[in-house]
Image (cartoon, helix red, strand yellow):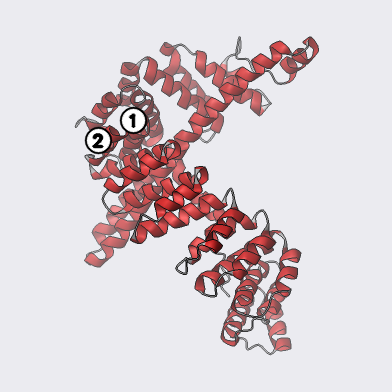
Amino acid sequence: MGLAPPWNAKNGAILIFEIRRLQDREVRTAYHQTGGCKTVLHAMKSPHHSRPVTLVATALTLIAAAGLFWQHRTYREEIERLRKSMAQERVSSRSASATDSDHRQTARKPSSAGQDLSTILALPDPATRIRSLIAFADTVPVAKIAETIKQLRDSSPDWDPDARAAIHLLLTRWATEAPDQALASLQTLDPTKHGGDATSILSGIAATDPLRAAKWLEDPDNRMTAFPIIGHFLAGSITKEWVRRDPSAALAWAEKLPDNQRIGAYVALMGTLASSDPRTASSLVTKLEDGGPRREAIKNIATLWSKQAPEAAMAWVQTLTGDDRQSALTETLGGWASKQPKAVAAYLDQNPNPDLTAAQVKAVAQPWVNREPAAAAAWVASRPAGAATTEAMSDVMWRWTLTEPVAASTWLRGQPAGPARDAGIAGLALATFDTDPSASLTWAASISDETKRAESLTKGIAEWMKRDATAAREFAAKNGIQVP
């Protein structure tokens, strides 16, 4: 029984949150981290050390580039949602009774008319504040955009999502309405503080004139591309817009980019295309060379396509081979299960695949256990015996126990002895250990496999000794467990 919690969604969310922070002020951190990687690589004289360091740096770049795509997509969707909401509210206010209209105007109706920025930022209701900010940003004269952005930054903390969304909108307007001024502002921009400004501006220009944005990036005198990570962000901000106009041209441009820009361009390009036209994205991805960018693009396509047309996505997965197929299958099953876990389970039952990995079984079970834990656990328990099933069962019971310990333990008591039940006990015991080590080890003692039972008890007692040696010794003495 391992006592450290496995990788989970919370940990992943924390990592993604930290990586996304690189885009703006925290890109300084990325610069130092990458510099640190270079220092370590230089210090390691033995050549066998260089590959792991390079792989780590590449992985961070892929995650960061994916973060760029999702962050810009989030900004765009949030701004569009707010604009639609404001339009609907205006329509409803005209058709409603005078009393209702007065009430809305008093309580929620957003308006930036006559309000300065400091007044808007001080509004107590967050929904009204956000709508007012967006309305305000839409009406700022182009000549005052730079001044307004400075005022926003001086009045809000760096992490404030409201201010960041407003700044992104202002920069996008600047890029589309006065591109020369917007690009000129980048000459004096400090990339370690506001590198994200460049991606917003380039996205805005690329939406109407991608060749102009590409020319700016390709300028040999462009000092921003010398900064680690930023080159990927900049290239991605261009391709994510270019691909909406001309996918083939965007891909051809991305293929010619240098190493410090290509990954970001690919990730953003394929991610954008996959959300609107996954079939075209799936045909273009085959043109990429084998490696990290191709694998990441395939995963993006699989995730998005599976949520739109899961059976079509599964048919595409069957055309892939090797690691591409395995990673695409995992993402497709997970994406489909996030919406229809029962349908995925039925599909797999009707189309048996003895080579399913633990990650693929868990991809189905994890979103399901959040909705119907007993059904998810029963499906995993019904799977053919093997490492994939036992690992998935342990994960399901760990997750279920964290939220509904009584229901999880009651269900598990009714399961027949065997590898699946043993794995479930391991997961339940793991989830219980921090709050009740005695109950955790009592469960571990019921594992039917003698070797696994002894291993779990030994590890459990050893960990308990670190926390409460007296209680651990008492439990061990009562249950005939040897104290390490």
Bin the neighbour count of mark 1 within 10 Å (Cα to Cα): few under 14, some 14-19, many 20 and up. many
Amino acid tagged 2: Trp
Amino acid tagged 1: Trp
Q: Which mark is residue 14?
A: none
Q: Which mark is residue 242?
A: 1
Residue at 22% x, 65% y: name it.
47
| Farthest front residue in view | 350
Is residue 120 among what the camera can see?
Answer: no
Residue 276, horizontal then vertical, whole percent: 44, 36
Give the vertical position of 199 relative to 405 (above or below): above
Give the vertical position of 220 relative to 7 (above or below): above
Residue 57, horizontal then vertical, whole percent: 33, 53
| Residue beneath disc 2 | 253
Distance from Cα at disc 1 to Cα at disc 2: 10 Å
Secondary structure beneath dot 2 equals: helix
Is residue 415 among what the camera can see?
Answer: yes
Residue 211, quarter of the rendered image: top left
Residue 207, quarter of the rendered image: top left
In the image, is 183 to the left or to the right of 439?
A: left
Q: Earlier in the sequence, mark 1 or mark 2?
A: 1
Residue 360, horizontal then vertical, whole percent: 49, 61
Secondary structure beneath dot 1 equals: helix
Residue at 68% x, 26% y: name it.
125
Q: Does the CB distance between marks 1 and 2 fall below 8 Å?
A: yes
Residue 473, horizontal then vertical, whole percent: 68, 83
